[in-house]
Every structure is written in structure tokens, then in C-alpha cells.
Image (cartoon, coloured by chain):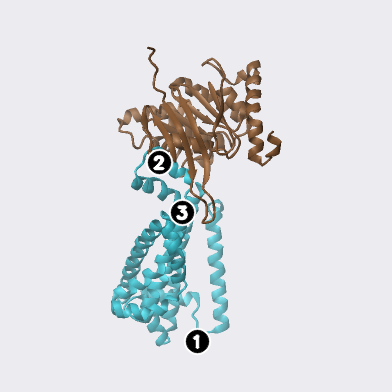
Amino acid sequence: MSRFITGPFRNALTLLVGLLVLWQALYWVVGDVALRSPLQTAAFMGRFMTSPQFLPHLAETGRAFGLALVLAVAIGLSIGFSLGLNRFMSDVFEPVLVAVYSIPKITLYPILLLAFGLGISAKVAFGAIHGIIPIALFTMAAVRSVRKVYLKTGRVLRLPPTEAILRIVLPAAMPEIFAGLRIGFSLTLIGTLLGEMFASQRGLGFLLMNAIGLHNVDLIMGLTVLLAGFAGVASAVLLSLNKRLQART
Amino acid sequence: MRDVPTPLVLLRGGEKVFPPPGPSGRPVHALGPLDLELRRGEFFAVVGPSGCGKSTLLELIAGLSTASRGEVAFEGRPIRGEIPDGVGVVFQEDASFPWLTVRDNIAFGLKRLPLPADEKTRRIERALAMMGLASFAASYPAQLSGGMRQRVCIARTLVTEPKLILLDEPFGALDQQTRLLMGDEVLNLWRKTGATVFLITHALDEAAMLADRIGVMSARPGRLIDVVETGWPRDRDSRIVEEEAFGAITARLWRSLRAESMKSLGHAGAAA
């Protein structure tokens, strides 16, 4: 039996148990005012996730995050490819991207709210702007570092430019692009939730903000665990895909 | 009047000048003027000191870059920056695609050719067999040695059945024994395919062993300073290194090259 519990799976299990122990210990120290124990949280989550108010909020956040991610990936990849394939353009725009990236994006939120209103579009836009730039920067670097000999091979085999991009540049740059997508994924999630927390009437971020206002420790803990779990699992899956891509090169 | 066949490749006064590397730099005269004729079916090797423009010459012939002056023609038609049909190139660097299996790498060579599927399969199987890759068809390049990966690249070129195969120091990164054996394989496929082979190498013995004719290039800007006919029979292999003539050819190549190599190393005075 024990031989099934090997390698990465065992490591993940150890980490999980360690975190639970730490959480429980912290709860004993801090007490009921600020925390709930793992068991209490699990029991609350069981009740909360089956209540009728949970699903619509989850759906709202899911929809906003999904849309933001699609936008961030599409726009980030387009910017990354157009800059990566053109030395002059990337020399001009890379410093601009880096500068924009260093702006705390929360300061742009009031402007986004004025532009998009209080609905889902502002959240989507705010999520997307978090993801676009890292995806673009990673993609640009990945495309630029594709080995010249691959491109020459494409020319010798007389591939038209679009096909050379699809069949050579894209797969050659994929491991690095994927690393960008992984980071873009988590930043887009952060952006979407921030958007929900500060100006929204639906979604998990809104619930969390509400719970803070009402000092509903159960709900704060539950939502935090839920979001952390989702982000952790997604990140682990993406990381293992990333490693598999990299193993081939 | 005797009928003179058109050469496969004809280079007349070919020159390549690269633009200055920086705002304050001067243009770099990399190659020529240079005249060269490749006969159909011959094995032509080029040797020269490092940095003399050997690879630039290959890129001009391949159509990968355009001559600054002069003219390059393939089968009588001028090449101007577009790659002519029937030319295959194997580069010095490993150009096998790490995301494809050996079989898919080789099949990649046929992407643009309008051939029936069974003809494609036939060519792929033959290239796999010819390069000794049949049992590695499902492997990825990362699982293969450097020599095997270079064979994958040669096989990818072979499936297109090129009339002219350009080899840019394809064994430069391999150890001496592997290089000798790869030399045998190149000779073998040259005989079997009937293609013209143009090989760039820095190894004088490799050139002396493989080629029908050997062009010796000067230091930059590279010009042809000698063309040596080896006179080997078509049916030959690496054992000709034992022949007396092999030593004589290598010695002649070195005589022509010694001064040029010193120039390229910066020993201007020693060249005299």
C-alpha cells in the first residue's frame, strides 16, 4: 500500500498536514475572536456550501474570473507575440510594459469603475489588467529566445510565416509561455477578487468583504480556505504541466 | 561543339557585406568576390580559417541570405533571397525539434510537399532505416545523443529528396570516432540519393576523406584561393585515410591554409 504514496503526492500530503497542525496551534493561541479551528471551519463550510445563497455567488465569481482569464490570455499572448517577433517593437514597448506593470493597479480601479460601472464588466476588466502584462512579458521573452536555427529550418522547408509561427515558434516557446500563463492565472484571480471586494454586490469577494464588516469569522475563514484551496490546486496542476513541458527540452 | 551541362549552382562575383554592427562601426565585408561552380552529383567540401565566411557562403547558396553583389543561380535560375525547391540544409547546431518525436521530426520535412500519404510514409520509413533511427522512431530528441539528433536532422532533409544537400559543419560538435562514422554515412547517402553535396567543415581530414573537390578559402573576406581535386573513386569509405594520397591531399590543404589561418588569428607578420 505504502508504495502508492510516493514522490510529489507524499510531499503534498506532508505540506497539508503541516499546515493543518499550524492552523490548529494558531487557533489555540489566538482563540475564538479571530479564528476558527480547522474542524469548525470544515463543519461550517459543509453547511454553507449546501445553502441556496452559495451557488449564485460562486457562479458570479467563476464567470467573472473565467472571462477575465480568457481576455488576459488572448490579449497577453497577442501583445507578447507581436512584440517578440519584432525586435524594434519590443525594444520600444518593453520598458513601457515594465513601467505599467509596476503601477499598483488598485489605484486604477476608480477609473475602471467610472468606465465600466458597478457590474461584472469592471471586475472582469480589473482581473484582466492584472494578468495581461505578465503573460505578455513572458510570451515576448519566450518568442524572442526561440533558437534561430529552428526558424532557419522553417525557411529551408519553405513554411509560410503563419505556419512557421504556429508549428515552430509556438511549440518552441511553449514551456516559457506556460510559465507566464501560470503567473497570469494567479494574478487574474487576485484582480478579480479585489474587484469584487471593493465595488460589487455579488460574488465571493463581495461575501468576504461583507463578512469582514459583520465580523462573521466563520464565513471569513470558510471563504479564505475555499479560495486558497482553489488557487493552490490550480497552481499545482499548472506547475506539473509546466514541468512536463520543460522535461522534453 | 561539346554540350556543356549547366552546373547545379553557379556563383559569379558573389559578395556579402553586412551593415555596420553599431552606429560608429564600419560595414563588415564578410565574403568574396567569389566564383564557384557546383557540378551535378559531386561532393564539394569547403575548408577555411574560422570566421572566413564559410557559413555566409552556404547561406547565399541556400537562398537564406541575398548577395550584396554578384549573382547566385540554382539550375540556371537566379536565387534572390528565396529558398529554391530541391535544396536541403543541415546546420551545425542541433535543429531537431524537442517537442516532436523522431518520426514527427522527420515527417515535418514533408509538411509542404503535396504528396499522397502512402508516399510520405514510404519516404519516412526509408529515411528512418537509412539513418539507423528505426528503433528510435517514437523517442524524443532529448533521449538521444548529439550524433543521433544530427541524424534526425539529416533524415528530415532526406525525405524531401533534395538535389542539393548543404551541410554546415554538421559533425562539428561530435567526437572524432563518431565523426568518421557519420562521414561514412554521408558518403553512403550521397551515393544512394545521387544528390550534390556541399559540405562546410573546419576539419581538413574530413574534407580530404569525403569530397571529390575541396575549395580552400582565405581569411575574411573569404575568397577561394585553391580548389583541390581528390580523385577518389565514387565507391569509397573512411578507410581511404590509410591511402598515401590522403596524406598528400591533407598536406596540400594545410599548405594553402596555414598562412590564412594565422591571419585570422591576428599573426599578420607570421603569415610571410
Label drawn at residue A33: 1
- Foreground: B224 or B149? B224
User: Mark 1 falls within which chain?
Assistant: A
Which one is in front in this view, the residue at disc 3 or the one at disc 1? 3
Label drawn at residue A155: 2
Residue B200, how many percent across, how many down? 54, 32
* Contact? badges 3 and 1 (CB < 8 Å): no
User: Mark 2 falls within which chain?
Assistant: A
Are the residues flagged by discs 2 and 1 from a single subunit? yes
How far apart marks 2 and 1 lie (CA) works out to 68 Å
| Residue extending farthest top | B1
The tint of chain A in the picture is cyan
- Looking at the image, which residue is at 29% across and 76% down? A116
Is residue A241 in view? no
The tint of chain B in the picture is brown
| Residue extending farthest right | B270
Query: Which circle's residue, 3 or 1, is located before the other in the chain?
Result: 1
Answer with left or right where residue A1 lies relative to residue A41. Answer: right
